[in-house]
Amino acid sequence: MTDLLECCMGLDIHRDIIVACLLKGPIGKQPVADVRSFSTLRPGMQELREWINEPPRSRDCGVSVQTPTLVKKRYLHWLF
């Protein structure tokens, strides 16, 4: 697999928890992973939004979301 980005973030959304994984590093090198879990309740989602929007994360990374259900999409609408 070819490296395309120096920084990316993925969200895995479950009923009670959202897991965020930030991968960051130079192309061609092993990235450093920062994995954090957040509650799906409003305070946890506010904490996730603040964590995502902290510089330099907010200007360096795109966000990829994997969510197969419509119920989970309402969380994302509020989050972003």
Image: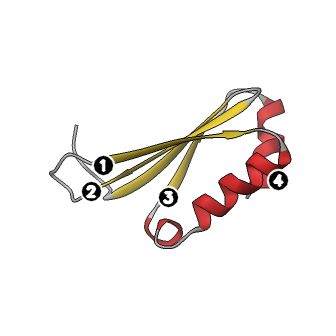
Q: Is residue 58 left or right of residue 50?
A: left
Query: Decide: marks 3, 4 in contact (CB < 8 A)?
Result: no
The residue at 31%/59% (across/down) is: 6
Dividing the picture into quadrants, the one containing residue 53 is: bottom right
Front of the two marks 3 and 1: 1
Pointer 1 local density, CA inside 10 Å: few below 14, some 14–19, many at least 20: few
Query: Decide: marks 1, 2 in contact (CB < 8 A)?
Result: yes
C-alpha gap between disc 4 and disc 1: 29 Å
Pointer 2 local density, CA inside 10 Å: few below 14, some 14–19, many at least 20: some
Q: Which residue is mark 1?
A: 32
Q: Amino acid at mark 4?
A: Trp
SS class, disc 2: loop
Q: Quadrant of the C terminus?
A: bottom right
The mark that comes first in sequence, 3 or 4, is 3
Judge whether 13 appears above or below 47 on screen: above
Q: Quadrant of the N terminus?
A: top left
The mark that comes first in sequence, 2 or 3, is 2
The mark that comes first in sequence, 3 or 1, is 1
C-alpha gap between disc 3 and disc 1: 16 Å
Q: Amino acid at mark 2?
A: Gly
The mark that comes first in sequence, 1 or 2, is 2
Q: Amino acid at mark 3?
A: Gly
SS class, disc 3: strand
Front of the two marks 1 and 2: 1
Q: Which residue is mark 2?
A: 25
Q: Position of residue 62 (x, y in %)?
A: 50, 58
Front of the two marks 2 and 3: 2
Disc count in the image?
A: 4
